[in-house]
Amino acid sequence: MTASKQKIIENLCYTELVYGRVNKKLATDFSKEQIETFIAKILKETHYKFFTKTGKNYYVINAENNIRLTINSNTYRVITVDRIKK
């Protein structure tokens, strides 16, 4: 999954809708740049063993920040971000 992690980081993209979705799901008011920086940080900090592919999506779980990212495996587009419930 190391190659996939690097490929995700290099090809990551966003839609206008996802910015609002991220702020809503995380109860934040981040700008587009802040969201992109935050997600890039999560991806870089998360060990590759926490990157899983199920169906057409990658799921990246970062327990340290209580975050799960969902990324389309074909387009590398961020779909959503969820808080992990402990």
Image (cartoon, rainbow, N blue to C red):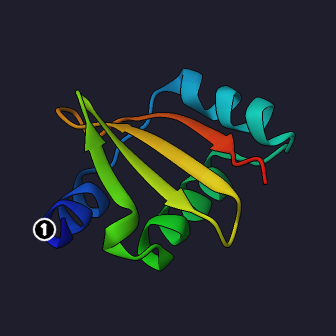
The residue carrying mark 1 is 3
- Residue at the limit of the structure toward the left, as seen here: 3
Name the residue rendered at 23%, 52% in the picture: 11
Does residue 64 appear to the left or right of 80 in the view shown?
Answer: right
* Location of residue 42 in the rendering, given as x and y in whole percent from the top left corner: 54, 66
| Most foreground residue, 40 or 72 | 72
Residue 37 percent across, percent down from the top left: 57, 63
Relative vertical location of residue 40 with respect to residue 35 in this rendering, above or below = below
Q: Which residue corresponds to the image point at 23% horizontal and 28% vertical from the top-left?
A: 55
The percent coordinates of residue 61 (x first, y second) are 51, 57
Front position in the image: 86 or 13: 86
Q: 66 above or below 79?
A: below
Q: The residue tagged with tag 1: helix, strand or loop?
A: helix
* Spot occupied by residue 4 in the image (x, y as percentages of width and height): 18, 60
Amino acid type, mark 1 = Ala
41 on left or right of 27: left
Q: Residues within 10 Å of mark 1 (few under 14, many from 20)?
A: few
Q: Quadrant of the N terminus?
A: bottom left
Quarter placement of the C terminus: bottom right
**Residue at horizontal 67 percent and vertical 27 percent from the top:** 21
The answer to whether residue 62 is left or right of residue 40 is: right
- Name the quadrant containing residue 18: top right
Q: Is residue 67 left or right of residue 70?
A: right
